[in-house]
Amino acid sequence: MDLEMNLNAPHSMGTTIIGVTYNGGVVLGADSRTSTGMYVANRASDKITQLTDNVYVCRSGSAADSQIVSDYVRYFLHQHTIQLGQSATSKVAANLIRLLSYNNKNMLETGLIVGGWDKYEGGKIYAIPLGGTLIEQPFAIGGSGSSYLYGFFDQAWKEGMTKDEAEQLVVKAVSLAIARDGASGGVVRTVIINSEGVTRNFYPGDKLQLWHEELEPQNSLLDLLNSSSPEPMNI
Amino acid sequence: MYPYVTGTSVVALKYKDGILMAADMGGSYGSTLRYKSVERMKPIGKHSLLGASGEISDFQEILRYLDELILYDNMWDDGNSLGPKEVHNYLTRVMYNRRNKFNPLWNSLVLGGVKNGQKYLGTVSMIGVNFEDNHVATGFGNHLARPILRQEWHENLSFENGVRLLEKCMRVLLYRDRSAVNKLQIAKITEDGVTISQPYSLKTYWEFSAFENPAQGAIGSW
């Protein structure tokens, strides 16, 4: 019997990460579980990290690798902004991520989704999977939980959604992935970026919609026993 | 060293006015058909067209190298421009030298072009194997498309017949290559320049009577 949890395994964010463009900007979404082997090291992580005022990145894979890559890119973008004299574009941010991911492909294990808004191209999403390929897409999904979302997005994605439709889609998707992926869990965080600025939202695990075979959470069995008589006890 | 996001076959042939090349738009991630809008053929300078299979990030890097090569060539401003033969040779050197350092660019490349009326079609692999021919292919294309081309290719194919021949090859690849996706582009390069078609999908045929009840004669078989 496996009672030996590998508590010294590298911290990995199993993860579900999503980036979606909408009519006016982008919505980024992620779960909040960070695991070391089978143990959940952090159940409320923030995987959507700021690079500049207008560009954020969703991190998946190795926690260490994704943190160090985003730290370097934040540093480079800060200098770039000073030299350029105006906000960096999401394309530049994505290409800097690509440079690090590609040139260190043998050592890094992190998949990233860059999302931002700039005055030249509006809202854009760039996926940078393992290996360092850069691919611009209307929406992107990543992390171990994304396996369960390919079919969902093939059906549910529509061009030209509103901000609220896009955010609802992202929350629903992360929630569905959490339901099936052991490496994803906790809360759903979203970040919306558009011409007006950045909005962070938080959807706690117990406020999400229930899916197949999931039951309404109760405080105690006792409440069920006391509320309606013959019902609860079942063999 | 191993690839992550990969493209499958590229098929190309010489025809009357130049070169025709076809590739689907898939970027696979292992067995998952992850990206379905990847452009795997790109124009290089005025006279060449490069198609790639294998690791997409390495293809993107090769495009950057070629960008710089073409830029420097233009900066000479001497009226000369790199033709497909020269670009193919450059790529061969790059691929072979990386192979010697045990750090390959994980691609199989097809380089086609026309310069001064001369048609050129060549290929380079990730270990530096390179050659020219009237028709070339990468990956599964070597096994499935080349035999068709050996039978049906001839000198001075018209544009229409060339496209039909390539589509015949791409359809077989769609049926028989697990990493193929049904969204492809066909590119043409002539003396006048490069044109890459809009993405489109091929019709497939499934109505063979033998397909309807294959296990009828032997229940449990397929």
Image (spheres, grey):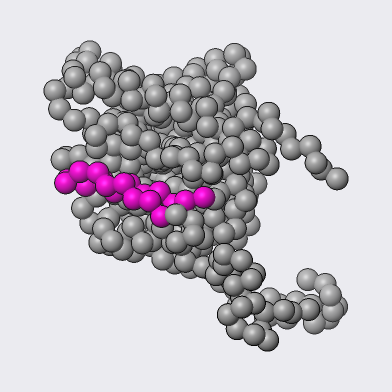
Q: Is residue A123 visible?
A: no
- Which picture quadrant has residue B206? bottom right
Which quadrant, please, contains the C terminus of chain A? bottom right
Q: Is residue A134 visible?
A: yes
- Which picture quadrant has residue B18? top left
Q: Is residue B70 left or right of residue A197?
A: right
Q: Is residue A170 left or right of residue B97?
A: left
Is A196 within the magenta? yes
Q: Residue B66 versus residue A94: which sits nearer the camera? A: A94
Residue that appears at 72% across and 79% down: A233
In the rendered structure, which segment of residues is drawn in magenta? A186-203
Q: Is residue A8 above or below residue A82?
A: below
Residue that appears at 17% across and 22% down: A84
Q: Is residue A142 above or below residue A177?
A: above
Q: Is residue A159 above or below residue B29?
A: below
Count how many numbered circles sit on residues in the image.
0
Q: Position of residue B103 (x, y in %)?
A: 58, 19
Q: Position of residue B78 (x, y in %)?
A: 20, 14
Which quadrant, please, contains the N terminus of chain A? top right
Q: Is residue A128 left or right of residue A51?
A: right
- The residue furthest bottom is A230
Residue that appears at 28% across and 41% down: A116
Q: Is residue A206 above or below residue A138?
A: below
Q: Residue A145 versus residue B23: which sits nearer the camera? A: A145
Residue that appears at 25% across and 61% down: A162
Q: Position of residue A228 (x, y in %)?
A: 60, 83
Is A6 within the magenta? no
- The dominant secondary structure in magenta is strand
